Amino acid sequence: MELTSIARPALLETMEQDMLIGGRRVAAASGKRFETRNPATGELLAMVAQGDAEDVDRAVKAARAALEGPWRRMKPAERQRIMLRLADLVEAHYDELAMLDTLDLGAPLSRTVLGKTRAAALLRYYAGQATLIAGDTLNNSAPGDVLSHTLKEPVGVVAAINPWNGPVGMAVWKTGPVLASGCTLVMKPAEQTPLSALRFAELCLEAGVPEGVINVVTGLGDTGAALSAHPGVDKIAFTGSTGVGEKIIKAAAPTMKRVTVELGGKSPNIVFADADLDKAVPAAAMAVFANSGQICSAGTRLFVQSSIREEFMERLAAFTRTIRVGDPLDPQTQIGPVVSAPQMDKILGYIEGARGEGAQALVGGSRLAGPGYDDGFFVAPTIFTDVQDGMTIAQEEIFGPVLSAFSFDTAEEVLERANATPFGLGSGVWTRDLSTAHRMARGIRAGSVWVNCYQMLDPGVPFGGFGVSGFGRESGPHHIEEYLETKAVWINLD
Ligand code: ADP
């Protein structure tokens, strides 16, 4: 479909957007609402129900009741059928979901529509897993004739707490293993981008997911805090900042909830002199600038081997100057605004700080001003040179379109420097040398190493972090294990 013919989503005809609990759209018990606005224009999109502890409690109870209802007895093949129907529905409605994210997040429509393939593939992958869950029959050496086997059971009520940088994709990713395993879900989308999760949850109902299996509680950080502390939640799947991740782990501790956290990053992207520069230059730029830098595994630390540094940086700067930043609805736009004024201020603060520490902005380095920019939160794609490894911009996650560029001489040296942050989420290596590629892949401390590519994701391949980038892996054959309890059964046959 032509991007320009994608309609304004029908959901936006209603200004007051309610939560979805137990199959019904409901206002917050307190009646409170918060605004969600288009970060490109400032337009008020909706007044969204602001859930508090009481609403969280309602949602957790609905999820618990659903867990103990017909959902529990539903055969895996039936769950699978529902999930495949959901995949078809998400595909059929993806333009609408993409448009909601474009308006709510500011990501270009040309980018959000591309999420369709992945969203449908994720649901179909997890649908496949629904019928593959299996325990083991295990040998034991107990005296007598004793049979032992394991049962795999759904872990229970799952709380998903989501970030704003890829709203519908994240909602789908969090829902797949819940439905496949027979768990139930209370999802809290980010306050900046709550709309597409609500629409997606409606599609779940339409696909035949029973009421109460997927609930969406909208609200601010304290809504997430109430959810992560609720004793009726059995597992938390969180994606977001490392700081909030730490709070969630603590909140989960008293009732020993299972927790997986996918957190921040400061990912290295390493270009060796023998790399194919025609590929590496644009990829290095988009590794950090895509989605305005609001990707946890963005390649924010670029290491270029000294012998090609000058040529590479010139080409990178030239490419970066061609990136079209602007109206997310314009099909030509590659990069939109950042999500909010506070996020823009945070990014501009890092930029100022970097200058103060002696780094030089080779490209960008400011907010974009002028017609088309003034009502939104647009930050120019920015490349800093003369960055030292210890500087704040080289150590902290910025979550904006800001690249720190370094040079290096040897593989050993760059490996040590690449690993010298507490994070470990993504990483890139550009080389034509097989030994270099494999040695770097082994040496880098990160959950993903992309060689001669960046940011590849697939439902069949695990994604997650080392160190303060979190623990647990999403996607891949073992993800579903996080949603299953293993019970050992001993049967004395004597
Ligand atoms: P981001 O970097 O995407 O802004 P955050 O970690 O700030 O990430 O937020 C991610 C999600 O965590 C959001 O849905 C937010 O409302 C929620 N959140 C914020 N504070 C807390 C908290 N103390 N406990 C639980 N969830 C929280």
Image (cartoon, rainbow, N blue to C red):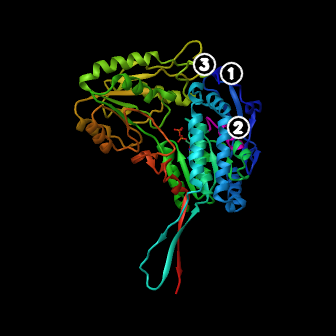
- Please report whichever mark, 1 or 2, sits nearer to the chain's N-terminal start: 1
Count neighbours of disc 3 (C-alpha within 10 A) and say few if under 14, some if 14 to 19, many if 20 or more: some
Assign a secondary structure to mark 2.
Answer: strand
Asked whether the viewer can see residue 122, the reply is: yes
205 left or right, relative to 315:
right
Percent coordinates x, y for residue 380 in the rendering: 48, 20
416 left or right, relative to 285:
left
Count neighbours of disc 2 (C-alpha within 10 A) and say few if under 14, some if 14 to 19, many if 20 or more: many
Asked whether the viewer can see residue 355, the reply is: no
Q: Decide whether residue 78 is among the magenta residues.
A: no
In space, the residues marked 1 and 2 are separated at their CA atoms by: 27 Å
Q: Is residue 125 above or below residue 113?
A: below
Front: mark 3 or 1: 1
Q: Tell me the amino acid under the disc marked 3.
A: Asp
Assign a secondary structure to mark 3.
Answer: loop
**Quadrant placement of the N terminus:** top right
Main SS type for the magenta part?
helix
- Residue 273 image label: none
Stretch of the chain drawn in magenta: 191-202
User: Which residue is labeled 2 in the image?
Assistant: 48
Percent coordinates x, y for residue 335 in the rendering: 52, 23
Assign a secondary structure to mark 1.
Answer: helix
Query: Among all residues in the image, which is located at the extreme top?
Result: 371
Tell whether circle 3 marks a residue whose Cβ is less than 8 angstroms from ligand 1.
no
Q: Decide whether residue 197 is among the magenta residues.
A: yes
- Residue 5 image label: 1
- Please report whichever mark, 3 or 1, sits nearer to the chain's N-terminal start: 1
Q: Tell me the amino acid under the disc marked 2.
A: Val
